Image: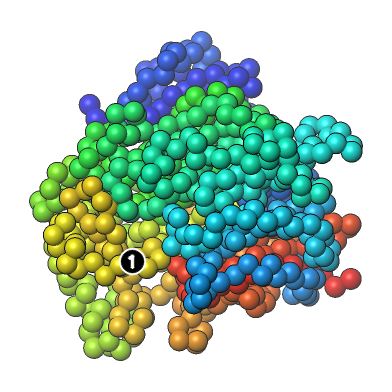
Amino acid sequence: MSNHHAFYPRQSKRRSQQLVPFTLSTLLLVPLPLLGQDTPDTEPDTEDSSAMSAAPIPLVPEGAVWDSFHGQLNAQKYSPLDQINVDNVGELEKAWEFHTGDVSDGSGDTAPTVWSATPVFANDTVYIGTPMYRVFALDPATGEERWRFDTNSSQETLTQPALKSRGVAYWEADEPVDGSACEKIIYFGTMDAQLFALDADSGELCEGFADGGVLNVNEWNNMPENWPLSLLQPPTVVGDRLILGWAGKDWEESIAPAGTVFSINARTGELEWTFEALTQEMRERSGTANVWTHMAADEELGLVYLPVASPSPNFWGGNRTEEVPLATSTTALDIDTGEVVWSRQWVHHDIWDYDINAAPTLMDITVDGEEIPALMQATKMGFLFVVNRETGEDVWPIEEREVPGGDGNVEGEVYSPTQPFPTVPAPLLDQEEKPKIWKLADMASFGQCSALWDDLWYEGMYTPPTTQGEGTLAYPDSAGGVQWGGVAFDPVSQTAVVNTSHIVQYIKLFNREDFEEYDTGSGYESGYSPQEGAPYGMRLEVALNWLGMPCWEPPFGELVALDMTTGDVKWRRPVGASQQFGFFMPESWGSPTIGGPAVTAGGLIFIGASMDAKVRAYSLETGEQLWKDQAQAPVVSNPSVYEYQGRQYVAFVAGGNTILKDHVGDQVVVYALPE
């Protein structure tokens, strides 16, 4: 019997109740692919089957917290502040702005910058880390600089096509000792795998952390000759631990550094445990399956939730034909030991680069009168998988469905006959047929879009890459669906909010000889990549006509609100405006989006994310746009919501990302109601 999911139920150390056992009723209720391929070292406890019906541990923010990448460890991106609300948000004005000076469009000697940092509010200070690897501490009310720290890191693009950072992480002792250094610490990583620990009050290095305040994570790299373990995403801080993933060099190598996750002591930097998604045997033939984005955690359950990426090479899997159940998954680990508690694989034998690219959002929801401790995992595919965060079991059925096989032209490939599909919520995109051609773009290009569509193979979601014609149509693929901003959640109304991009791309594989002939280089998340060591190089392109117009019908991006008591869509609307040749398109066409939303008790959604570099506020209840303002560049990060000295603020980083357009910035812009 073929099993694709790994599933390891066992008792959490922080919970007296035991998890649901495997019984005959479980086998009847749970789809067979859920059962584990690998078995844990100890058998699951089978004495008590009451856990699934027990009331969940409440999961709500303790006050107005925004001290991490997603606001809180539960990744809800929710603030209980309501000073700014649907009645007065139209009065928002710029309270202050700050320019770091760390910006480049790549036209000079410095590589271009990509800045996706969340402004972290902690210790009565706003902290930001820049793509040129400096840290700034700012006054929350005025933006006045309190201190800065320069890592003097290399400005070489060692693993990425641009200098990049998603900001800082914050930790403080349970009972900080007044006057003692490094009782509160800011952590900041660099592309060359150095993790800096800075005193949050002064910006001085914490001498007791690793080597004088700097940890060289590359010392744990099993293949440093390929590339360093770039620390572009801040660590996930859980208690006195830093859970650390890393980013690599996509699409380049067949055999790559293994995707190890490290747990280190927050004070000392000492390594406590590691997690490997790949077996040792697999690591000799493949690599990555890393965690390059943020994670979520439930401290009461003692679990940290990892969004795990795909193995290498990304678009050919002939070197990894056996099942790899922890790759492209959400995997729950025991915070203390790193042991796998449960895991759900969302793509079997991933050959589309469908990395799980956003932290899962943890939420308590009421479904058919039952209180459920849930987890929602958004994906590049436009799927929203909802499971019980204690056990990994379906909240609504997740079905294994047959998917297209190969066309016989890719040597050595073995395809998964089925893939998981959520039934509720329904997919955010209609992937059953080729997206409709945008008649305006087709006419403007004299039928170029129609000709391309005719030469692209597509039999629905998970059509495999091919060597034939122009390749395989992918809807969505690497740039589509939901990006690292993830899902926001209002725990009061039990409403989830997610922004999604509608982007058509196409993939073609080239045998090694043909690749060398056709390779014209790569852009940012597009173009040709070698997949060295595999028999095929690849090309990934966005389906545009010669004028740069999308060949598929708008909208190109949407904001969607879901009722999580039923999984039904409450409303959906185009978000943002696309831009081409300096002109803004109608907002009814929407925009591709990068960066996520924040929600507040004031009944509001705040988001940037769009090509037009505007920041906006929407009604959580109706989706009506209530406010907008122009930022320096696209806000491709999550906003922050905080209160300081009785006044509520909303902060954005306008840093830009060349995936959207060649427009970058160095602006922190913060809004509040008039005093």
**34 versus 257 height, above or below:** above
Seen in the image, is 482 located left or right of residue 415?
A: right
Where is residue 553 drawn, in percent x and y?
36, 75
SS for dot 1? loop
Where is residue 529 drawn, in percent x and y?
29, 59
Report the quarter where the C terminus lies. Answer: bottom right
Residue annotated with mark 1: 522
Foreground residue, 114 or 216? Answer: 216
Q: Looking at the image, can residue 348 be seen?
A: no
Disc count in the image?
Answer: 1
What's the colour scheme? rainbow
Residue at 80% x, 71% y is: 95
Where is residue 648 drawn, in percent x and y?
81, 61
Seen in the image, is 62 located left or right of residue 295?
A: right
Seen in the image, is 63 located left or right of residue 30?
A: right
Residue at 42% x, 15% y is: 41
Q: Looking at the image, can residue 408 be seen?
A: yes
Residue at 53% x, 34% y is: 262
Foreground residue, 592 or 54? Answer: 592
Label 1: how many Cα within 10 Å (few below 14, some 14–19, many 20+): some
In which quadrant of the rendered view does residue 634 lie?
A: bottom right
Could you tell me the amino acid type at mark 1? Ser
Residue at 41% x, 19% y is: 40
**103 versus 561 height, above or below:** below
In which quadrant of the rendered view does residue 159 lie?
A: bottom left
Where is residue 105 drawn, in percent x and y?
52, 74
**97 versus 156 height, above or below:** below
Seen in the image, is 141 located left or right of residue 562?
A: right
Report the quarter where the N terminus lies. Answer: top left
